[in-house]
Image (spheres, coloured by chain):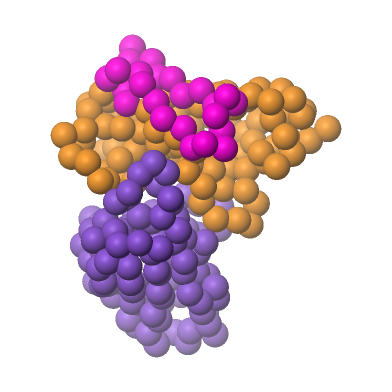
Amino acid sequence: EVDMTQSPATLSVSLGEGATLSCRASQSIGTNLAWYQQKPGQAPRLLIYRASTRATGIPDRFSGSGSGTEFTLTITGLQSEDSAVYYCHQYDSWPPWTFGQGTKVEIK
Amino acid sequence: QVQLVQSGAEVKKPGASVNVSCKASGYTFINYFMHWVRQAPGQGLEWMGIIKPSAGTSNHAQKFQGRLTLTRDTSTNTFYMELRGLRTEDTAVYYCAREGRDIDNSDNWFDPWGQGTLVTVSS
């Protein structure tokens, strides 16, 4: 099973500033990684797949990078609606499909 | 557009079973694998299982072996998740989530997700 570790657990960022979220896999997963955004009471929403491809309708202030075991989700120019929990998800080695424990982004 | 609409919230007693449905629309039902993922209150996402709609075959996470059954009805484009022997720790929101690409492609992300179904297990 591939363990996914996200850091930090919580990130406090001022409006308009940038946020960098990290995700580490316990073994190489190539670029088979997705990022999801989840707001309270809502289902996860796909942001990024193949480590760096934005999903349809996702603003370009969201970007993903990385390969192998180290991945990053970057949010530039944070907006109030970006307050959420973000999860990484590996779909390279399965079953099981595994998720990180999440990073909560809050507005400072 | 692709939509996954799940059944409503359930309250169950320990030891009971629950059946959650997920009705798919907006795409060719048999062409995409469907997953089930759950989220306990305040916790992260946990993969439970996958079903291939064309054949009805499924695969489950080890921890649910013997308690989880995934099925589908191709006449109504609906998926079902049955969890038996409920425990209080099964209290969670249960999601269906379709793979992002069709069955001719492996290694897929999940998109879209159903709205979630809260299952509460309490005596």
User: Residue A61 lies in what quarter of the image?
Assistant: bottom left
User: Residue B94 lies in what quarter of the image?
Assistant: top right
Image location of residue A56, percent across then percent down:
23, 55
Image location of residue B50, percent across then percent down:
39, 33
Q: Colour of chain B?
A: orange
Q: Colour of chain A?
A: purple
In the image, the segment drawn in magenta is B52-76
Residue at 54% over, 73% down: A9
Q: Is residue A106 left or right of residue B103?
A: right
Image location of residue A55, percent across then percent down:
25, 57
The total number of labels drawn is: 0
The quadrant of the rendering that contains the N terminus of chain B is: top left
Image location of residue B16, percent across then percent down:
71, 23
Q: Residue B23: within the magenta?
A: no
Is residue A59 visible in the rendered image? The answer is no
Specify the farthest residue to the right.
B123
Residue at 39% over, 69% down: A24
